[in-house]
Structure formats: C-alpha cells, structure tokens
Image (cartoon, helix red, strand yellow):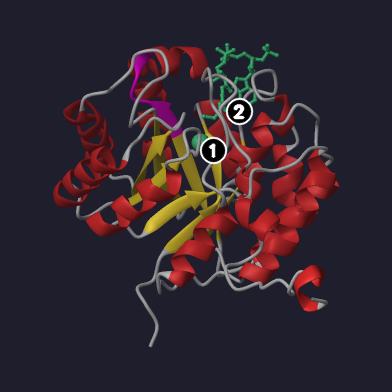
Amino acid sequence: MSGKRIYIHEVAPRDGFQNEANFIDTDAKVALIDHLSWCGFAKIEATSFTSPKAIPALRDAEAVMHRIKRDPEVVYTVLVPNVRGAERALSCSVDEVNLVMSVSESHNRSNLKMTREQSFAQLSDIIRVVKSTDVTINVSLSTAMGCPMEGDIRQDEVLGWVQRFADLGVDGVTLCDTTGMAYPTQVGTLCKAALRRFAELEITLHFHNTRGMALANTLSALAAGIDRFDASLGGLGGCPYAPGASGNICTEDLAHMLELEGYDTNLDLTALLSASAMLPGLIGHDVPSQILKAGRRLDLHSMPSNVVNA
Ligand code: COA
Ligand code: ZN
C-alpha cells in the first residue's frame, strides 16, 4: 500500500547556488543536476536567467541548460525576473518558466529593482507570449509569509496577487517563505484559503529553515491539503537581496520525514544522500543537512566498546 503522492521540486541548483560566494564551475553544476535527474524529483529548478550583475553565481545559465541530460519524466524549470530573462529561457527550450516577484514592495525593490506594479507589467507581457507556446508558467511569490523589512503581509494581499496571476491563466503559483518567517498555524490558514479559492492552480509551498520551523510548516501545509514542495539538497539556499536569509528546507531531511510518515515522494533517499555528500567539496563549506550528519533513523550504531568488553 503506498501513501499519498507528494511532489518534490529540487531547487539547490538555483536557490542554493545563487547564494554561494564562490563561483561553481559549470561542469560541476551540470554533473550535480544530472545526478539529481535520476533521484525521482517531479521538478528541478536548474538555474535562473537573471542579470549576471545581480546574480553572478548563475551567469552560466545558458551553458547549464544546454549541457544537462534531461529526463523526460522531470520538469526543468528556471527562475525568470523580467522580459530579457524570459527570452533567454525560451531560447534554451525550458519546460517551464518560474516567474518571480515579491508580495512586499520593499523586497521587490531590493531584489528586482522594480516596484511591484512594474514587475507585474513585465510578467504579464511574458505570460501573454509564453501562453502561445507549450512551456508552462509558474509564478513564485516571495515574502508571502513575511517580509524582513515590512513584517507581516496581510493574507488578502497575498491572495490578491495570486488572483491577478490566476486571471492571466498561469499554471501554478508558489508561496515562498523567503526568510523563514512562517509558523505552522499561519501556514495552515494560508494554505487552506489558497486551495479553496484557487482549485484550478497547482499550489507549491517554498520554505526556508531560517528559524528551524520548515519541517513543522510542511506538516501544517500537508494537513491543509498541499502536495507540492520546493526543497534544496543539503539545505543550501537563500536570497542575496533579503537581509537575514538562509537555507531552504533540506531535501533529504524532508524526504526522510515524509517517508517515515508514509507519503510517496518517489525520491531515492540513498541517491540523495550520496549527492548531498558531494556538496561540501563542491562549495567549500559544510551544509545544514541533519540526515547527512546523523544518518537515517534506523542507521544503527554498534554497542560502545566499554559496554561490549565489560
Ligand atoms: N539576463 C541578463 N542580463 C540582464 C537581464 C537578464 N534577465 N536583465 C537585465 N540584464 C542586464 C541588462 O542588459 C543591463 O546590462 P548592461 O548594463 O550591460 O546594459 C543590466 O542587466 C541592467 O539592466 P536593467 O534592466 O537596468 O536591470 P536592473 O539593474 O534594474 O536589475 C533585474 C533588474 C531584475 C534584472 C535584477 O535585479 C535581477 O536579475 N534580479 C534577480 C535577483 C534574484 O535572482 N534574486 C534571488 C531570487 S529571488
Ligand atoms: Zn527561496
């Protein structure tokens, strides 16, 4: 008997690598994405088509998209902030564009150098063009559960932005907790309201573990009926233009919990852990992953020698 299917989107190659100080070699990025392609993800966010001045770590986006070996079972998506980014993404035959803007004016101006209305105008133009192709359209709404400069964002404000994109006919919307400000009851209320109002949209939740609440928030979202989550291998991640941002919910920690709880994630945890073990060598520092350090719940230890010899 298999449990409820939960769709996991791997975002380390985008949310993770965008925040690394040292440039990761294109061949290494491609090798990691190729490994992730056979771990069982529904989606992989492979890179972003942002300004190379804003996000130098991902300045090799075209090369990455051209060199990876794509698995037809996986949706390869890319983050796009403006019309120029969409043109670049379409020239690489992506499966999906993940358009980004923030529901808080302050974070949108800091991250994208535009007002929210300017972003919405650019993203609307992109949507009109992309809708005539077979590329699907997702919109990631940053700071949907709190802005590090403005604080709480009203739920009706968040849902109002979802409505504006739903009216343009997008396929999905991701509610992003950009700096880990979400807490479980808030998540439950928001998810229930979003699912009730936007039954036609694919809704994804995107948590950061900045305050240690990402797994708790996931349980709350699951209870509300959400079945799609972004997660990042090793727990890498963070927005360089959001003060205090840190890593996403860790993919292997999430997969480990969901497996114990009886959900069907389609993920190969052993393959994930071997990919995560390669990260410190790739990025030059330790990663937040708990399961990489502690092992799975039933990876048992031998008896301490002082007990055995007594
Ligand atoms: N891809 C490549 N180059 C781009 C680009 C894109 N998508 N968008 C703009 N540029 C280039 C322009 O061609 C111009 O180049 P030039 O200086 O050589 O003439 C330069 O960047 C500035 O263009 P402009 O339109 O004035 O952009 P900006 O400086 O106002 O920055 C964004 C706006 C949106 C492009 C930039 O802030 C950005 O890429 N932000 C992404 C932030 C991000 O990814 N955050 C983390 C994820 S949430
Ligand atoms: Zn993020």
**Residue underneath mark 2:** 50
State whether label 2 is within 8 Å of ligand 1: yes
Which stretch did the figure color magenta?
100-105
Q: Residue 83 location in percent, x, y?
A: 50, 27
Q: Which residue is mark 1?
A: 79
Whether 26 is drawn above or below 290: the answer is above
Q: Is residue 74 left or right of residue 5?
A: right
Location of the C terminus (image quadrant): bottom right
Image position, residue 98 (x, y; %): 47, 41
Q: Quadrant of ligand 1?
A: top right
Asked if labels 2 and 1 touch by Cβ distance under 8 angstroms, the answer is yes
Q: Residue at x 47, y 33 (%)?
A: 211
Residue 214, which numbered label? none
- Secondary structure type for disc 2: loop
- Asked if 39 appears above or below 214 in the picture, the reply is below
Question: In front: 234, or 195?
Answer: 234
Q: Is residue 132 visible?
A: no
Q: Amino acid at mark 1?
A: Leu
Q: As shown in the figure, which amino acid type bears the numbered disc 2?
A: Thr
Q: Is 103 in the magenta?
A: yes
N-term mark: 1 or 2:
2
CB of mark 1 near ligand 1 (< 8 Å)? yes
